[in-house]
Amino acid sequence: MCRGGVGATIVRFNMRPASTRTLFLLLSLALLTPLTAPAQQSSSAYGPLPVFEFHSGFWINLHHALYYEARLREFPPNASQKGNPVPQVKLKLMKDAATALSPAERIAWDNSVAYYAANYANKDLLFNNELILIKNQLADFEDCDELSGAQKKTCDAGLAPKLTQALDAAAPVYRAHLWADQDRANRRWVAAVAPLVEEQGVGISQRLADIYQTKWPKEKIRVDVSAYANPSGAYTTIDPLRVTISSTDARNQGDEAFEVLFHEASHGIAEPVESAIIRECRQRDKAIPRDLWHALIFYTTGEVIRPLLTPAEGDPQDQEDAVKPNINRPPASRKETYIPYAIREGLYERGWKDYLQLLTRFWQPYLDNKSTFDDAIARMVSAL
Ligand SMILES: [Zn+2]
């Protein structure tokens, strides 16, 4: 549930600057990268849905599977808590497949995992520029059977030769034993969230853009659905704005998937909030609060979506008024009150309690049209 990016806008107050080595790698990748990726086939995209463009791409799924297995190898769950925590994603598909590998397949897969373990396991999918570039490139080449260009020139993805080799060697193993199940899981996930996106997506996107005093992107936001994503279960990178989301993560299932999608997309449009918080802090000579903007977008997405996913009680007009414009009443099939992600997953309890108080006291009135954006931010910051 976070955001990273490539290019000039990546350097933000909450991000680590790129190292010289990373910049060199970026430059190398940029030089090697062909200007255009092959035309995408409609089979890998889902449409026509508003707001989002969903993909279940072969290479991006393989990339995350190798990364995930490499992480498990480097940081086994019962090892000391050195390094980043091990992702808590279901391993069932991987374990089932592992038992079916032939000795040759096992060697090929293990070599590719070893390459990922040596080169990427200690890097963060969200914050590492090299991993962001690789991820985007693999998404763009999703319709290619291999990435070296040996069979089709336009399929030369321009990646480092050893990475290309690791991916191309693991591909037949992944295709034979894992991909069908993971692709099915991804498609099931999209099919489950699609009705809500279809019905409510445009209204929610307009409402969020209004709240953040910006415009929603004209282009549909690309969402790469992957069996494994990062430890948070989803992450968003900017320039270009792309969401990667895990179809198997328990936190992203059911109606919650809809909130996660809009939380992630909000990472791409909530820049005015970050800027306003920084500006107000500087004016008051206060330290910039870490993650207040992130708590704010969690809170906002949850509050905007909550009425849609909670059954109407009493006057249905109340529900319609809560989210404008033209938001329909929640389907009668929903029985329980919807609990937003940040509450459900205990984010406020784990260090954001003060932020929740600020948001409830000063930001909620703005959501209720009882305060202005500037006033709400100014009051939050002065109460820090
Ligand atoms: Zn987030």
Image (cartoon, helix red, strand yellow):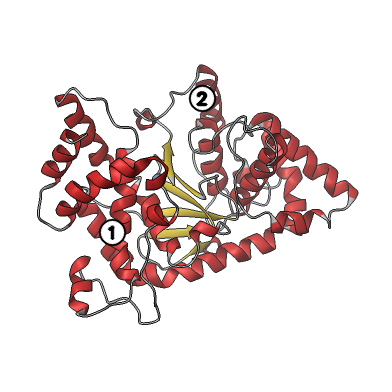
Q: Amino acid at mark 2?
A: Leu
**Residue 145 in sight in this render:** yes
Q: Residue at x 33, y 65 (%)?
A: 201
Displayed quadrant of residue 258 = bottom left
Element class at badge 2: helix
Under circle 1, the secondary element is helix
Three-letter amino acid code at the position of disc 1: Glu
Residue 340 marker = none
Marking on residue 303: 1
Specify few, some or many for label 1: CA neighbours under 10 Å numbering under 14, 14-19, or 20 or more. some
Give the percent coordinates (x, y) of residue 189.
53, 65
Residue 311, x across and y down, in percent:
32, 76
N-term-proximal mark, 1 vs 2: 2
Quadrant (top left/top right/bottom left/bottom right) for the C terminus? top left
Q: Nearer the viewer, mark 1 or mark 2?
A: 1
Q: Could you tell me how far apart the alpha carbons at marks 1 and 2 are, in whole angstroms?
A: 42 Å
Residue bearing the label numbered 2: 27
Q: Position of residue 135 (x, y in %)?
A: 54, 42
Residue 269 seen in the figure: no
